[in-house]
Image (cartoon, rainbow, N blue to C red):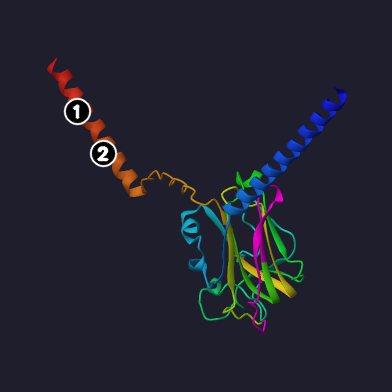
Amino acid sequence: MGCCNLRLARCNLRLRGVAGAAAAMLFTSVTALAQTFLGPTPYLGKNDSPFVASIDAGTTFLETFEGGALATPGVSASAGSVIGPGGLTDSVDADDGTIDGSGTNGHSFFSGGGSTGITFTFDAGVLGALPTQVGIVWTDGDGTTLFEAFGPSGFPLGQIGPVAIAVPPNSGETAEDRFFGVTNPAGISAIRISNSSGGIEVDHLQYGIFGATPPPPIAVIPVPTISETALLLLVLLAAVAAWRRLAARRNERR
């Protein structure tokens, strides 16, 4: 009996192991099928983003770095900083107000370690939930470019590339700028973009909730102007005077 019980216990353990592995494989397969990668596609301004409708609706943040910092909420960068206008700056073309083939008059986000890349991590606590759509525009670097995305708990969702999109020289030309993005209904915890050599420059970080309802418009209570207020006071005074005259006449009749 003892031997049979031991065999039965071992069999149960094996079955549990098989079930656990199957569940893990199912979770991995479902997660892998849920996401959609976008790009690389040419990008000269906000209107080239596949998320432009939700950006305009206010449900997707767009960080252009034109304020001189990474200032949109709920996101942090593993490396790099904002750089301003200069001969080597490669901002998104439209950020300086003109699409003219040059990004030297705008701002971008730069890191000297292109092979390590830049990881943008999203904070569900600040945002209320993980974003379900994220994008970034690669504007400059050398070698080949790789875009990676990660789901909840850092689960790898997949990647785009490496792709060969870099075109020398590195002096602000915008024809090579490319959008990389991903959507995932379960959420996106981070993205990483890198290129195999040199530094890396990116712009137009965008992230939000796919299909979210735009915030309701703020009700505006009209405030009367000084002339309107004065007119209202005159009407009230006239009404008071008329009431007093009517009351005086009634008293006289009595």
Q: Residue furthest left?
A: 253
Say what amino acid the circle numbered 2 marks.
Answer: Val
Q: State which quarter of the image contains the N terminus.
A: top right
Q: State which quarter of the image contains the C terminus.
A: top left
Residue drawn at x 20%, y 31% is 242
Instruction: Identify the residue position indicated by label 1 in the image.
Output: 245
Residue drawn at x 52%, y 81% is 100
Give the x, y percent position of residue 198.
75, 76
Q: Residue furthest top?
A: 254
Horizontal side of 79 relative to 1 (left or right) equals left
Instruction: Identify the residue position indicated by label 2 in the image.
Output: 235
Q: Is residue 124 visible?
A: yes
Please, is residue 11 above or below residue 76 in the view? Answer: above
Q: Secondary structure at mark 2?
A: helix
Please, is residue 100 above or below residue 189 in the view? Answer: below
Horizontal side of 87 relative to 37 (left or right) equals right
Give the x, y percent position of residue 13.
78, 34
Q: Give the quarter of the image for residue 135.
A: bottom right
**Label drawn at residue 84:** none
Say what amino acid the circle numbered 1 marks.
Answer: Arg
Give the x, y percent position of residue 223.
38, 45
Q: Going from the N terminus, do you reach mark 1 or mark 2 first? A: 2
Question: How many C-alpha atoms fall within 10 Å of the one at disc 1: few (<14), some, or many (≥20)?
Answer: few
Please, is residue 86 above or below residue 70 in the view? Answer: below
Which one is in front, 63 or 170? Answer: 170
Residue drawn at x 36%, y 48% is 226
Give the x, y percent position of residue 230.
32, 44
Q: What stretch of residues is rendered in magenta?
A: 147-170
Q: Give the quarter of the image for residue 178.
A: bottom right
Find out whether residue 169 is within the magenta segment.
yes
